[in-house]
Image: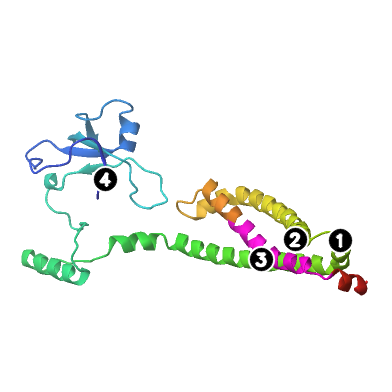
Amino acid sequence: MEMEFISGRDFTNSDGPATSRKAIVNRAFVLKFFGNTNPIGRVFYDSGKPDKPYQVIGVVNDTKYYSLREDPAPIVFVSFTQANGPEQYSTLMIRSREALPALISSIKSAASQINPAMVLDFSVFKTQIRDGLLRERLLATLSGFFGVLATALAMVGLYGVISYLVVRRRTEIGLRMALGANHVDILAMILREAAVLLGAGLAIGMALALSVGNIAASMLYGLKPRDPLTLAAAVTAMAAIALVASFLPAQRAASVDPMTALREE
């Protein structure tokens, strides 16, 4: 399972039924039962079975057991070679580079030679993890879809607002140009107004994002409610989109013929 050892050793072939029972524990187990002391060599007993002592020979990092959403719990790993015979229901992890159909066929063939009545059920570990994150994947897909939709609506809305302002102020823009304002001055004026709208929208959006971040984190596995990189990327993306949406109306405003605009008045 590629669990990282913190201290101690792994099980070996010498840890057989005739030797004292050995156990590997995780960090959560050590903190709960041994505190800050060195657990290697310490002995503990199975709950309600004082005749079954276990000696700690290794410590591994905390891992998830039942669900990816759970907090790490104290876990004890024991050697299969020290068990009292095989259990009726056992789960074995097989790691192989062979193609899945061929691997399953070879395992069934080997099992039938041991016991033809053995019932085998196969599942892919990666598939189990993926199925366990079905809710998160669905919510992530929906969130992404509505995020793209909201971005498109924001772009169209900002373009419409700036275009409307340009039409309403066509005469003012013509007058400014007649009094000496050049192409760049008009372009900068319209973009400044778009920047004010963008700043107000980003401020409100950031406040809402920070306030509901914890709710989103409880629904999506591994999501950080206040990730600076994600927030910075969202702000940068919205600023770029707003610039593109505002540039065309601003360019059109800067291209107004002063005489034509004044005659319309």
Image point (45%, 53%), residue name: 221
Q: Position of residue 181 (x, y in %)?
A: 83, 59
Q: Residues within 10 Å of mark 4 (few under 14, many from 20)?
A: few
Left or right of 219 in this view: 17: left
The mark that comes first in sequence, 4 or 3, is: 4
Q: Which residue is mark 2?
A: 187
Quadrant hosting residue 253? bottom right
* Residue 161 visible in the picture: no
**Residue 212 in view (yes/no):** yes
Are the residues flagged by discs 3 and 1 in contact, CB closer than 8 Å?
Answer: no
Eyeballing the image, is 91 above or below 49?
below
Q: Which numbered dot is residue 155?
A: 3
The amino acid at mark 3 is Met
The residue carrying mark 1 is 176
The amino acid on which the numbered mark 1 sits, given as a three-letter code, is Arg
Residue 248 belongs to magenta span: yes
Residue at the spot x=14%, y=46% of the render? Answer: 83
Front-lying residue, 51 or 233: 233
The secondary structure type at the circle numbered 3 is helix
Which residues are the magenta region?
A: 237-257
Instruction: Report x, y in % for residue 37.
Output: 29, 25
Sequence order check: which comes first, mark 2 or mark 3?
A: 3
Q: Which residue is mark 4?
A: 3
